[in-house]
Image (tube, rainbow, N blue to C red):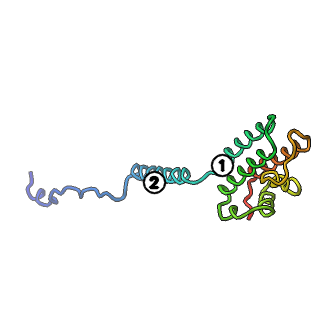
């Protein structure tokens, strides 16, 4: 072998070590999945902590259905049904619209609030009769046809108020 030719060759060198950047596509995919999982977990946690209007509606409608079956039974007077419907709507309104918006309302202002938020069956004499009956003003006789029709208007107005989707201020 010719030594002059061998001397002219460059010395042996190892290639430089591979750097960590840029990342391989697999690592990018893994990071994207990790970020997506963290965002989903944060969203689920936030959603679990937020009060749900649908949950409130379902609970209130269940209680209203119990009141409706109770109102059809003999021996239940109008005053009891009126008080229970009134209390149910108060609790629902405080939960849905906030204590500041609802707690100070009474009488005509409360009825106007219910009518404005979907309970149009409570407009006029029906709402006034409910308040009088609930708070001891005038109580109708049991199982009278007019009293049964009025109970139905009270319950229909309460159902419409609970099912109302708009949030009017």
Q: In the rendering, which numbered label is found on residue 56?
A: 1
Q: In the rendering, which numbered label is found on residue 81?
A: none
Find residue 59 and report its image quarter.
top right
Which label sits in the foreground, 2 or 1? 1
Left or right of residue 16: residue 135 = right
Q: x and y percent of residue 14 in the render?
A: 19, 55
Q: Is residue 106 above or below residue 146?
A: below
Element assignment for label 1: helix
Q: x and y percent of residue 43 in the render?
A: 53, 53
Relative depth, front residue between 168 and 149:
149
* Circle 2 crowding by C-alpha within 10 Å: few under 14, some 14–19, many from 20: few
Find residue 69 and report its image quarter.
top right
Relative depth, front residue between 135 and 157:
135
Distance from the alpha carbon under mark 2 to that under mark 1: 33 Å
Left or right of residue 62: residue 140 = right
Which residue is rendered at x = 45% and y = 54% of the image? 35
Left or right of residue 95: residue 21 = left
Element assignment for label 2: helix
Q: Is residue 150 above or below residue 167?
A: above
Which residue is rendered at x = 65% and y = 61% of the image? 99
Left or right of residue 86: residue 2 = left
Q: Quadrant of the C terminus?
A: bottom right
Q: Earlier in the sequence, mark 2 or mark 1?
A: 2
* Circle 1 crowding by C-alpha within 10 Å: few under 14, some 14–19, many from 20: some
Q: Which residue of the protein is positioned furthest toward the right in this rendering?
A: 145
Q: x and y percent of residue 150 in the render?
A: 87, 46
Relative depth, front residue between 136 and 51:
136
Relative depth, front residue between 40 and 76:
76
Q: x and y percent of residue 15 in the render?
A: 23, 56
Check disc 2 and report the residue beneath it: 35
């Amino acid at each position: 072998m010719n030594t002059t030719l061998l001397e002219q060759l460059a010395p042996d060198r190892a290639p430089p070590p591979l750097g960590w950047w840029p990342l391989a596509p697999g690592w990018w995919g893994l990071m994207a999945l990790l970020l997506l999982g963290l965002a989903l977990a944060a969203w689920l946690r936030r959603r679990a902590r937020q009060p749900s209007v649908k949950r409130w509606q379902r609970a209130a409608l269940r209680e209203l259905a119990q009141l409706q079956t109770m109102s059809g039974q003999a021996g239940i007077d109008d005053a009891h049904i009126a008080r229970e419907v009134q209390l149910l709507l108060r609790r629902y309104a405080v939960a849905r619209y906030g204590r500041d918006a609802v707690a100070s309302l009474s009488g005509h202002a409360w009825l106007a609030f219910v009518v404005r938020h979907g309970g149009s069956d409570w407009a006029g004499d029906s709402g006034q009769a409910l308040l009088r009956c609930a708070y001891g003003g005038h109580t109708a006789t049991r199982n009278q046809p007019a009293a049964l029709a009025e109970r139905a208007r009270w319950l229909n107005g309460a159902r419409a108020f609970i099912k109302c989707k708009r949030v009017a201020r």
